[in-house]
């Protein structure tokens, strides 16, 4: 199953004794969609980011985010972003250029 399988499903029966119908809502939780990232400010060694849901209809509970970044002359590193702190400040970025991406996690 995938999250797109979520929805209301209805079962209808009909026979010589009558008919009946029941509906149930199915919610499929899966990994949350990664959020949209907005950089609100930056200094020589910090970046302040604000996170917004990419899909407001996605009701998967998010417990936090991991920001993956790669310094210009280094290896990929990870910073944990606490879900409730929005905006969040990522510190100790002593480089002028670094690509990054973020993903969500849930339990």
Image (cartoon, helix red, strand yellow):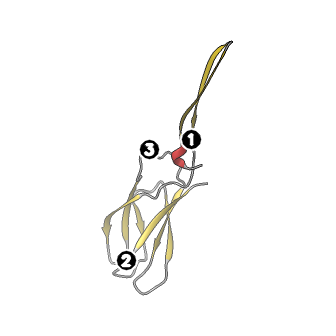
Front tag of 2 and 1: 1
First in sequence: mark 2 vs mark 1: 1
Give residue 80's position: percent from left, percent from top.
51, 66
Write down the quadrant of residue 90 in the picture: bottom left
32 sits left or right of 88 in the view: right
* Picture coordinates of residue 23, whole percent (x, y): 58, 28
Q: Residues within 10 Å of mark 2 (few under 14, many from 20)?
A: few
Judge by depth and name the residue closer to the eye, 16 or 47: 16
Judging by the rendered image, the residue that carries numbered circle 1 is 27
Residue placed under numbered mark 3 in the picture: 57
Q: Nearer the viewer, residue 24 or 18?
A: 18
Tag 1, which secondary structure?
A: loop
Q: Quadrant of residue 44?
A: bottom left
Q: Is residue 16 left or right of residue 98?
A: right
Query: Rounded to the nearest whole Å, what is the CA distance between mark 2 and mark 1?
Result: 42 Å
* Location of residue 62 with respect to 37 vertically, above or below: above
* 21 to the left or right of 100: right
Q: Identify the residue at horizontal 37%, vertical 77% (top origin).
A: 45
- Mark found first going from the N terminus, 3 or 2: 2
Q: Residue furthest top?
A: 17
Spatial CA distance of label 3 from label 2 is 35 Å
Give the structural element (helix, strand or loop) at label 3: loop
Picture coordinates of residue 5 (x, y %)? 54, 44
Residue in the image at 37% along x and 73% along y: 46
Q: Which residue is mark 2?
A: 45
- From the image, state whether disc 3 or disc 2 is nearer to you: 3
Instruction: Let me know if residue 42 appears in the view.
Output: yes
Residue shown at the point (49%, 83%) measured from the top left: 75
Q: Residues within 10 Å of mark 1 (few under 14, many from 20)?
A: some
Q: Are marks 2 and 1 in contact (CB under 8 Å)?
A: no
Image quadrant containing the C terminus: bottom right
């Amino acid at each position: 199953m995938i999250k797109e399988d979520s929805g209301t499903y209805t079962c209808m029966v009909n026979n010589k004794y009558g008919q009946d119908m029941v509906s149930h809502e199915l919610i499929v939780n899966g990994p949350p969609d990664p959020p949209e990232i907005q950089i609100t400010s930056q200094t020589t060694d910090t970046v302040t980011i604000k996170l917004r849901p990419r899909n407001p209809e996605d009701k998967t509970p998010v417990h936090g985010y991991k920001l993956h970044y790669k310094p210009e002359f280094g290896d990929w590193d990870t910073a944990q972003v606490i879900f409730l702190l929005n905006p969040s400040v990522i510190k100790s970025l002593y480089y002028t250029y670094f690509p990054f991406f973020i993903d969500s996690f849930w339990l």
